[in-house]
Image: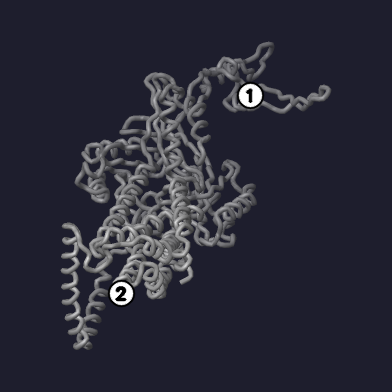
Amino acid sequence: MFLTRISIAQPVFTTMMMVAVVAFGLIGWRSIPIDRFPAIDYPVVAVMTPFSGASPETVESDVTRLIEDELSTLAGIDRITSTSAQGHSSVIALFTLETRSATAVQDVRDSVAAITPDLPSGADAPQVVRFNPTDDPVVTLALSSANLGPGGLSRLAEDEIVPRLTAIPGVGTASLVGAVKDQITVAPDPDLLRAHGLGVADLADALRRDNLRVPGGALNSGAQTLSVQMNAEVTSAEDLGDLVIATQGAGQIRLRDLASVTRGTSDPESLAFHNGQPALAIEVVRADGANTVAVAHAVAALVSELNGGELPADARLDILTNEATAIEDNYETVRSTLFEGAVLAVVIVFFFLNSWRSTVITALTLPIAFLGTLAVIGMLGFTLNMLTMLALTLSVGILIDDAIVVRENITRHLHMGKDHHRAALDGTAEIGLAVVATTLALCAVFLPLAFMDGIVGRFFVQFGITVTVAVLISLFVSFTLDPMLSSVWHDPASQPGTRRGVFGRAVARFGDGFDRLGERYSRLLAICLRWRKTTVALALACLIASLSLFPLLGFEFLPAGDEGRISVEVKTATGSSRDYTALKTGQIAAIVADMPEVAGIYTAVAAGSGSGDNAARMEITLVPLAGRTASADEMVVRMRAALAQIPGVDLGIVSVGGAGGGGAPIEMSVRGRMATIWRGRRGISRR
């Protein structure tokens, strides 16, 4: 083959090619990001519409149905789901996978803009966002202080911490949970209002009329144009108390004469708890396409920097949850498994070749093929995720096959009395077609995985391409480096009758034993050839028996993992207040905290887009797997049984460890009149 002839004739050129492959692979290894799963473009768009004070029925009839009807006319729509809650509408449009998410967002935004004037006057403008089911918070932080109250902590987070977090490359949003805002509270005195003949509406009109900032035109001064604003906004409770409400006779009635005016903080729009104690949480979500591990490391570095002296002396920022921890643990586990597999493959090759030089020549295929594959997948924009690492691990035994076959055939030609140069040429040429056929057969098996339809195809595209690239590079190395080294690096151990040491003789005895096993196999093969029909019948029986076992196997999109985290979705009755929902989550936390396997509990009430006051989510962190006897799935079963005693809540408890951070294994959709569904939901739950 021409590659072999060039490689043997130009050993320096061949060596430099391999060095270049290794160099590019090392560069790619350092630059390829680590993630849990391949980056997938989910064409899912969410439309969030706040409608303060409206009941779920009103939200559904006046907002949700209007948006659903408009979105149903868009091209590429696969499914539309909606949730109408107290004071909030959430509509999620799922497009076909062939639709680009950016195009889907723009189409939805244009459609929603067309119907915005038709929405009720009390509804806020709809928010159109790209929805990614894998976009859970990368890192959740807790801000605490012994002296700062809720207002001080909120100002510290909003003014100093959140801007620093959002400035980190790859951070999309940093949302506060449990924060409060500064406000001035006006508490009218009914008796004073009646005494002056005024009402609450008069106070509201005066506040809207006189407490504002309006443009006042422009002032031209030579080469400059200055904008003018009429600023009547108050900045303190005292200034607001001086606001004139009405004039009666010669006197002016001010706001302080009719109401108490105090400066304070608003009620929190959401609540956060850490191990049952109130907290101010900051949830950091990565930007679309950003790397989870890189973002988490940058956030952790910023937290260390802030705690190092940039925060007030009594304030502290702690990391509650970190998505990168599980990803890095999985990566380290797979990497160690990959290394162990490579070492074992080399050891097995040595036992059969009984020559350390032949083993080195053969084993060089593994690092070169691995590093070359990393260089290619880095240029393709892939990540080191569960699928690409699985592909590399699966390729360990495949990559060295070609080199073993080529080296063994070259050794056979050496035993025929040929010199190393001729043996390398003839041995590679003789076996070359078979090696190419084997490699292309592997490509034909794995490459089509990259072209499967649906979400499975999106996941396995990197797997199929990685395996294909790895086996093609191993074929290239087997036809270039292996023959070249065989021709210039003479191996005395490959000659028959060579004197060997103690270890070499022990390995040789292993080879003799394997030869005797081969002789027994030959006798068994002769029997099979003599009884051909019986052999075929037994093979068919084994095939049928194997196929009959399929119904006994479970089928899943991805294997269940144990990341030591459990997610609990909490729903109380419609119309429940935040405090009532927080009370129920406190009861849940008290029960769960008594379990020895639980290390920490983070709770967020009414947090996130589309979450009402009756919704909460809890993330329960378990102790490391080595410190507990129960798996995360077993803990889920225990928690369901323990929490069944709490009345007034609907719970969804799942272990975190799959795409999207965990989800219910079965979801049911019940359609019909809302009143009928509501009456029958308890019966459905019991059954």
Rendered image: mark on residue 122: none
Instruction: State the image coordinates of residue 457 (x, y, percent, origin top left).
Output: 45, 63
Using residue 555 as the reference point, say whether residue 209 is left or right of it.
right
Camera-side mark, 1 or 2 = 2
Q: Which residue is mark 1?
A: 211
The residue lying toward the viewer, choosing from 313 and 180, is 313
Contact flag, marks 1 and 2 (Cβ < 8 Å) = no
Q: Nearer the viewer, residue 615 or 418?
A: 418
The residue lying at 42 percent from left, 30 percent from top is 303
- Identify residue type, mark 2: Met
| Residue on which the image places disc 2 | 416
Q: CA distance from mark 1 to mark 2?
A: 102 Å
- Identify the residue at image location x=43%, y=60%: 466
Tell me the colour scheme of the image. Answer: one colour
- Judged left or right of residue 223, residue 378 is left
Q: Nearer the viewer, residue 147 or 682?
A: 147
From the top left corner, tell me how far across and down residue 397 is, in percent: 32, 62
Which quarter of the rendered picture does the C terminus lie within?
bottom left
Residue type marked 1: Asn
The structure residue drawn at horizontal position 47% and vertical position 44%, both measured from the top left corner, is 610
Please tell me whether residue 420 is drawn above or below residue 178 in the rendered image.
below
Q: As rendered, which of 681 and 437 lies closer to the eye?
A: 437
